[in-house]
Image (cartoon, rainbow, N blue to C red):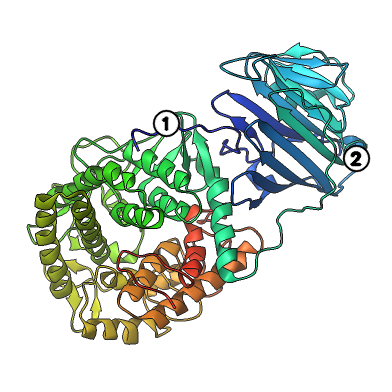
Amino acid sequence: MSRERKRRLGWGTWNPDRPAELVHPELDIRLTPVLYAASANDVSLLAPGETRLGMRSLDGREARLRSEFHGTVLDWRFRFGESGVEIEWRTRKSGEWGLRFWVALVASGGSGWYFDEATSELQAEASGGLGDKASGRLRIRAANAPLLTTFHENLDALCDEFVDKGYFYLGSRGTSGPVAALRFNLEEASRQRIVCRAWPCGTPELTQDDWTLADDHPSGSAQQALQAINDVMRWNHVYDAINRRPYTGLTRFWSARKFGGFGVWLDDVAFNAWLWGHVDLQGAKDNLAAIFAFQTEAGNFPCLVTGNDAWVDRTQLPILGYVVWNLYQRSGDESLIHWAFHKLLANFDWWWRHRELGGAGLVAYGTTPGVGRGLYRGTKLGAKNESAMDNSPIHDDAPFDPETGLLQAFDVGANSLLALDNEMLVLMADLLGEKDVAARLRARHTDHVARIRDQLWDGERGVFANRLRDGSFVRQLAPTSFYPLVAAAATPEQITSLVDNYLMPWEKFGGDVALPSVARDDPCYADNVYWRGRVWPTLNFWTQRGLHRAGLHDQARALAEKSWRLFQVGWKNRICGENFHAETGAVTDQPDTDTFYSWGALMAALAIAQIGDVTPWDVETK
């Protein structure tokens, strides 16, 4: 991958805080829709709370969304091409007289803008390869010509003018300036089509095809699920202007408000890479590149890197080996393995150097003393961050040792996924012909799997559980108790007990809404706060993977179907839940959840797995 040509980005919905703003990162040009409602004397930049994210085409060339502002509802369609971008809107519902509701398309960036009154065409001066060779200009024209074209120092100046002086004010009308606003009202332009292109394009015509927020969903759960994955991934794929690269955010709406411009949370972005593998390998590569860019000299991939902070003292669950190998299986792109292997191996070895607890051949979560200055460094909370299940009850009884920075508990989930990571690295080493490395990894894997099977099995309760240093088992149970299945670390007798006594009974992890993040008969289940009782897509994902690997295809299918039904409840309203209430399936019943969270699409991916699966252990779903 290092030998590939530089990634070209082009037009897109790259701004994480403004889903309707169109950006060309390489040219630094922005086209920003601005709404003004005279009834409320209020301005909108189509913020997240005022938009509903619609369908994205599978080829990435079309995006739709709906805006609602003081009772006026507009449907928007954006089309991206090699030569430019097209913008359309249609009035779905009027909240006031159209003459008093204005839409401005604001053009900024570049080296300045000029409006040709004779042709009603807005042009940008050439800058860094902008425009066609003959004229050196970017050109913007509308089917309904603008009623007014104004120029401003910046976007805020336009917004302030609307609020302070209303839509009758003409003092900013002009022909040139750094920021241009093409202004329309819905009386004259209830429908509009605007073309931005690098050569003369003529006056665009209004299209006659009928379209709304989203097309009718394709038939079949797998096709519907693929469309959902595509929509969630493409809307959350944004441009990190600080590091100058694209990646898929956890949710596009956290980037500036929460993370200071960008946020690479390890496991979330790793899952995004895996999800992109169903749609477009380039999206997967973007996310892997964002993760690998922050690998520390010690070898670990940081838990979190944002515009504000870097948690380099800790990592998260080692799932990247599975992700990279699965992407290779889907694409056949061997360069992925050449590019990733030694980075993944360094992270794997870091785990054993820094997270093995007491030389026991098993690992625990931690925060490495004296490394970095990240928030929560050196605390129990920092150690729990590595699990990605920060407030899970399974950590409650585990003491924290500040000298080593380790939780004093061998974690079932961490050990199982580290064993799986080991297995994937063996496959990669074999592919690359690195025999000595493969032999070392095989020996480690054999020993590790045996220790999981023997030492993390609570024979009295018949379940895998976290184990404290004193030998006692942690009382609280999470779906991580099923993770040894995905690592092939359970005996047939253990598998039977897991399914009969824990997967199926409602008071444990059964029921139509599954899987709760703690057993239902645990007092913490009623908390319904984050990892204390709610359903999480990642837990369903690894449990379903494990059931398939163990040959329990009926149980795996049942969990996938439950996951898909749960996802669909919110998706009917374009909600992709970060987590769900474990009895009602609600997403928005409490504030600790996001409504367009990337890994929510894992629930849709499990529906695709029922039609045709790709796994390292070659399970065929029938």
Secondary structure at badge 1 equals loop
Number of callouts:
2
- Report x, y in % for residue 200: 76, 23
Picture residue at 66% right of the left edge, 22% below the top: 108
- Report x, y in % for residue 195: 75, 32
Residue topped by disc 2: 98
Q: Extreme left residue here?
A: 359
As drawn, 93 above or below 484? above
Question: Is 467 situated left or right of 285 in this image?
Answer: left
Question: Is 110 situated left or right of 162 in this image?
Answer: left
Residue type highlighted by circle 2? Gly
N-term-proximal mark, 1 vs 2: 1
Q: Residues within 10 Å of mark 1 (few under 14, many from 20)?
A: few
Residue topped by disc 1: 5
Picture residue at 65% right of the left edge, 30% below the top: 83
Secondary structure at badge 2 equals helix
Q: Quadrant of the N terminus?
A: top left
Residue nearest the observer in this picture, 209 or 528 = 209
Report whether residue 576 is seen.
Answer: no
Quarter of image, res 338: top left
